[in-house]
Image (tube, grey):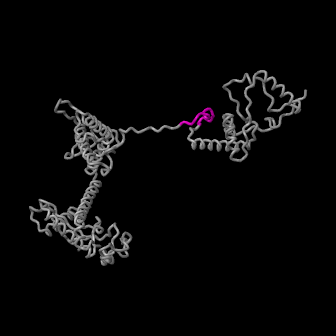
Amino acid sequence: MRTNPPLAGSSASMPIAQGPDQAHAILQLSQLSPELLQNLLNLAAMQAGTHQSPPFVRPELDAQQQRGSVQGISRDNLTLGGPSASSVATPNTLSNAPASRREPPIDPALLEASEIGAVRAEVNDLRAQLEELKRSRGMSGDDDGDADDEGEGRQRKRRKRKSSKMDCVLSVEIKQLTRQQKETRTELQSMIKHEMEELTGISKKEKLPEPDTPVSSQTDGSNHEHHQRMRPKLNHDVTHPKNRSIIMRAAELVWNEQTNDESRRLKHKDVKFTEADLRAFATTVLRSWRRRFEVANNVEKGNKAKLQARKNKRHQRQRTLKAARLAVADLYADGHDGANPSCLLETDWMTEEVSSLDTSDDEEKEAHREQIVQAARLTDKEIKCGTVLERIKPLFRSEEVDGIYEELDELGRQKQIESGKTYARKRRVDLGRTRVRPPVVPLYPFMVRESWFEDHIAGTDLEENYEVLPEDPEGFGSNA
């Protein structure tokens, strides 16, 4: 009995792929659907410039058409000289095969071992490009690898709208608010602070409790009911659950009270605010408590906080001095042919006024205080009644600039006398201390004292922070 020779490209003439990587590649190929594999091949052909239209897929044939097809195949076999691998169908291929079973699109045995890695890499690359194409078109990814949902329409992602209740209205920069909004903001902040103090038992005058302090109860005077106080965790951030619960509770109480027509106490009842504003105000109160707690329980942070407080007061005094001189700048211009000195009034150029030394040494502070008292010629009673400030003049200022500032101060005193308003000012003394460092704001050329630059700035590290403008302002210095 004669046997037909093996078909070209059959499994009998090629070695079966071995190895874990090859087996994994075969498994990947066998799990691809025909539709997805065809899409990937079409995409590869488009990139290579050899794309052809997909082959025509003949619809399912009825029984009579199947018999005609079989006869046509037989005639083709006679013409070609024998059956081919693509035209011979095994029994039950069309009608008896299970519907749920899917045959792999490519027989793994038909692949050369050397081709498996290349095919695997190409498939992975095409799949990645297909997913990227889907994302660029706003389509959802197909994670399971089949193409069942690829024909569905694009699904537009809906963004969740934030509730208007969550938007902040009053807890923004105060310069963005109207007068009525500012007043309402102040009222709500006061209410929130009161509720926070009632919930926790903490007030500004009392010492902050330790984290392990037992929680006490409070008694409502109206109904004598006992309510357990809420103890904050001041050694933790405001996001701690206990701190967060206090913030939420205080905001809820004020919100319920001020949105009720019967209990509302706000002056401007038409000003809108949100519960998010109230939570922001409560968070600010809790943060201030945390800073007080850190200053009281951490020596290093306490010293830094005190030093920063002194610096803030010093800068505030400089800003106050600048504002007083700006208020009479027009009067100066009227007496000097329109030369307005407003451009010469920067906060960093003002004289500093300090009440004590920036040191933690108590002996040095006491010695400095004695010098101030002697220079001011104060009695013991005057020493107890107020603070004496020491003037520290910037050393960079020329005599011309000092003269302008002195004239502005005199105009301010005259204006105050004419208005009939007098203010009790703290005593100022000059102990001869100066500030050597250059200011942050660039200087006009006529403002710089030559001896200061030559003795303290030239050739030192301070010269890097020293900057002079190209020319003097109109009406001053070389442009006078």
Question: In the image, which residues are magenta?
Answer: 142-155
Quadrant of the rendered image containing residue 435: bottom left
Q: Residue at x 67, y 43 (%)?
A: 43
Q: Is residue 220 magenta?
A: no
Quarter holding the C terminus is: bottom left
The answer to whether residue 300 is left or right of residue 206 is right
Quadrant of the rendered image containing residue 307: bottom left
Residue 283 is situated, as x and y percent measured from the top left of the image, at 31, 44
Q: Is residue 153 magenta?
A: yes
Residue 13 vertical position relative to residue 288 in the rendered view, above or below:
above
Residue 259 vertical position relative to residue 118 in the rendered view, above or below:
above
The answer to whether residue 382 is left or right of residue 40 is left
Quarter holding the N terminus is: top right
Residue 26 is situated, as x and y percent measured from the top left of the image, at 69, 37
Foreground of the two, 249 or 153 = 153
Q: Residue at x 24, y 46 (%)?
A: 183
Residue 217 is situated, as x and y percent measured from the top left of the image, at 22, 34
Residue 452 is situated, as x and y percent measured from the top left of the image, at 30, 76
Q: Main secondary structure of the magenta part?
A: loop
